[in-house]
Every structure is written in C-alpha cells, then in structure tokens.
Image: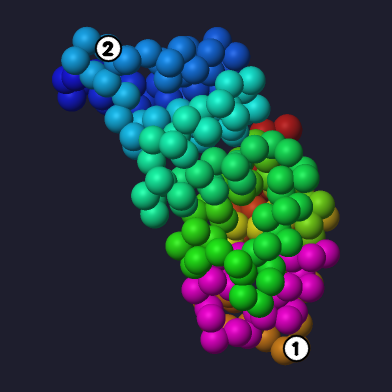
Amino acid sequence: GTDNQRLWFDNYVGLARTPQALAQLAKWASLPQVAKGMPLDVDRGWNIARKLARFNHPKADDMLTEMKIKDNSDRGQRQALATEAIQPNLKVKEKWVAILKQPKPEISFSQARAVLKSLFPVEQRALTKTFADEYYNYLKKYGNSENDLFVGSIAESLVPLTCAPTESLRLRDFLKTPAGFNPTVTKVLKVNLDEDERCQRIRAMSSL
C-alpha cells in the first residue's frame, strides 16, 4: 500500500467509534488485504483488535484469539493483555486492579505498563470511581516506595478523577497526607489534579 493509504487507514482505525465504523474494522480484519497491495500487518491487526475490544464489538473475542495465534512474541503478549484489559467490563477491571495492586504483580513490568495504558480509556474513566478506596489505600501503603516508576504508573493510570468536584476534592485532601509520597507520585497526582480542575472550570464556563 501507499503511504497515503496507510495514513488514511491508521486515522480511520484511530477515530472509529460508531457501530458502522467498527463493523468496517471487523470486515477488514477478515480480508487478505485492506486495499490493493496492502495486507493487514501485525501491528495494525492489534490496533483493530484493541479497538473492537474497547467498544465491545461482537467480533472482538474472535479477533483477539486470531491475533494471539499470529503473534506470540513478547510484544504480542503485551498487546494481548492490553486488549483484554481495555474491555468495558467491570469484572475485567476488577481482575486487573487486583493483580496490579499486589506488591509483586504476577506479570512483568512491561506487561503491567501495557495493561495500565489500556485499562481506563477516556470513555471508561467513570469506572475508576469504583476503585477509589483501593487506589488511595494502595498509595498510602506504597506511595513512598523506591519502585517509583511502577507506583507512579499506577498513580497515573488509575487516578479516580472525572472532571467533577467530589473526586478532585478528595484527591486534594489526600495530598495533605503527613506520610508523604516519593517525588514521582507527588508530581503525577498534582498534574492530574490540576488538569481535572481545569476541566471543571471549562465545563462551568461552557454552561453559562
């Protein structure tokens, strides 16, 4: 395929949300090539699999199974975990939060990072409120850990903020915790709080 075809395809996959667009992705996944001279490569196959899972398309499970067979590399295994984690299913989220909050998760750091990046996409952020108590208890216990990269990733990805004052006020109070946190975690929490409060100001202005 040409560079323009690949660019158009990648943009389409990135923007796909509607049932019609998702159906088109599923159709492309079943074809030998998505355009003349453009077979579906592994990376683009994973992008489609993840998008179908994210919006709970009926073909999502089949696509994930096919991609696991096609790509059993380390990167493929990370993609498979991320694709599972992105499903809009509370039981799936509960499973992964339980795994990730362990002192030594049963998956590698790179796999955990892949899951964290996919666990709560923007349209699923409201689900983070379900885990707010677990989130704050985790940070009380590990927020000053020397493993600042991993704990910082947890703090970033699971932060229960939804552009609403109830959650942001809780986080602001939490930041006053006497024990304190390592600098990475503190920075992550403050940046997310600032962004959420800015979102609230914009929302308030738009309703005037």
- Residue identifier under label 2: 35
Give the left or right position of residue 133, taking residue 28 as reference. Answer: right
| Crowd band around label 2 with a 10 angstrom C-alpha radius: few (<14), some (14–19), many (20+) | some
Question: Who is closer to the viewer here, 8 or 173?
Answer: 8
Give the left or right position of residue 89, taking residue 30 as reference. Answer: right
Residue 94 horizontal/vertical position (percent) = 76, 52
Residue range corresponding to the magenta coloring: 133-155
| Crowd band around label 1 with a 10 angstrom C-alpha radius: few (<14), some (14–19), many (20+) | few
- Where disc 1 sits, the SS reads loop
Q: Main secondary structure of the magenta part?
A: helix
- Residue identifier under label 1: 178
Task: Determine whether 75 is above or below 83 in the image.
Answer: below
Badge nearest the viewer, 2 or 1: 2
User: Residue visible at 60% across and 14% down?
Assistant: 19
Residue 97 visible to an observer of this rendering: yes
Number of the label disc, if any, that sits on residue 134: none
Q: Quadrant of the C terminus?
A: top right
User: Residue visible at 50% across and 44% down?
Assistant: 80
Residue 207 horizontal/vertical position (percent) = 73, 32
